[in-house]
Image (spheres, grey):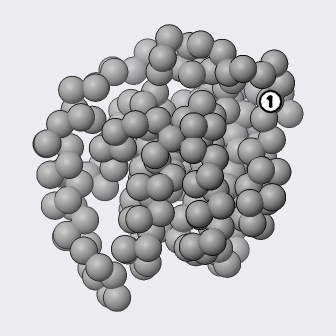
Amino acid sequence: MNATRPRDEFLRTLAGRYTGQLVVSVYTTCFEWMAIRPDALNYVAVGAMGQAGSHALGLALGQPDQEVWVLDGDGSLLMNLGSLVTLAGAKPKNLTHFVFQNGSYEANGRASLPVAHAIDFAAMARAAGIADAYQFSEPEALDHWLLHRGPATGPALVDLRVLSSATSYPQRYDYIHSAEARDTFRAALKALPHTGARA
């Protein structure tokens, strides 16, 4: 599966199917998502590479009636592959982990990953115990999956083969590391209906 389409096309596809999910995103993908789909339920206070899935799992378990999306990078997920095993063991039905794979640590100067080939994150997820794992290299295929996806029976991982976005988006490090970002998300989370959820 060769990447031919930029990441922001996939993000716009997700934005078109957004229905109020809690969205946990990291670094370059986070900045683009904030510009494309600003929302108080965007969780941006991840803090370190590799932690998006773990933060999202906590939210999914604490808010079982609320769907959670993770917008992760390939370099970031590689720093915490063990999180896939934890996710498989916890079995939250309300969590979907999207991995945007472009072969680089883009937030750190676009250094290449230490492999010359694409990584099969879907196969890794299945090996960890996540049965619902997919690969897409076109936003239209992602959109079709989102539209026709049946009731979730467990967590899902979606490996998206992308190119870096050509458009330049604001790099708002001051915001993602701010108390304002945490307070905005906390207030939005508390405002959700808590049918069996824990705030």
Q: Residue at x 48, y 17 (%)?
A: 108
Tell whether 178 sits left or right of 75: left
Tell whether 194 sits left or right of 11: left
Residue 16 x/y as whole percent: 51, 49
- Front-lying residue, 54 or 131: 54
Q: Which residue is mark 1?
A: 118
Query: Which quadrant of the figure has residue 120?
Result: top right
Q: Residues within 10 Å of mark 1 (few under 14, many from 20)?
A: some
Residue 188 x/y as whole percent: 21, 61
Is 145 drawn above or below residue 196 in the view shown? above
Tell whether 197 sits left or right of 66: left
Is 65 drawn above or below residue 60 in the view shown? below
Residue 121 x/y as whole percent: 74, 45
Amino acid under disc 1? Ala
Query: Which quadrant of the figure has residue 181?
Result: top left
Q: Secondary structure at mark 1?
A: loop
Q: Residue at x 28, y 26 (%)?
A: 173
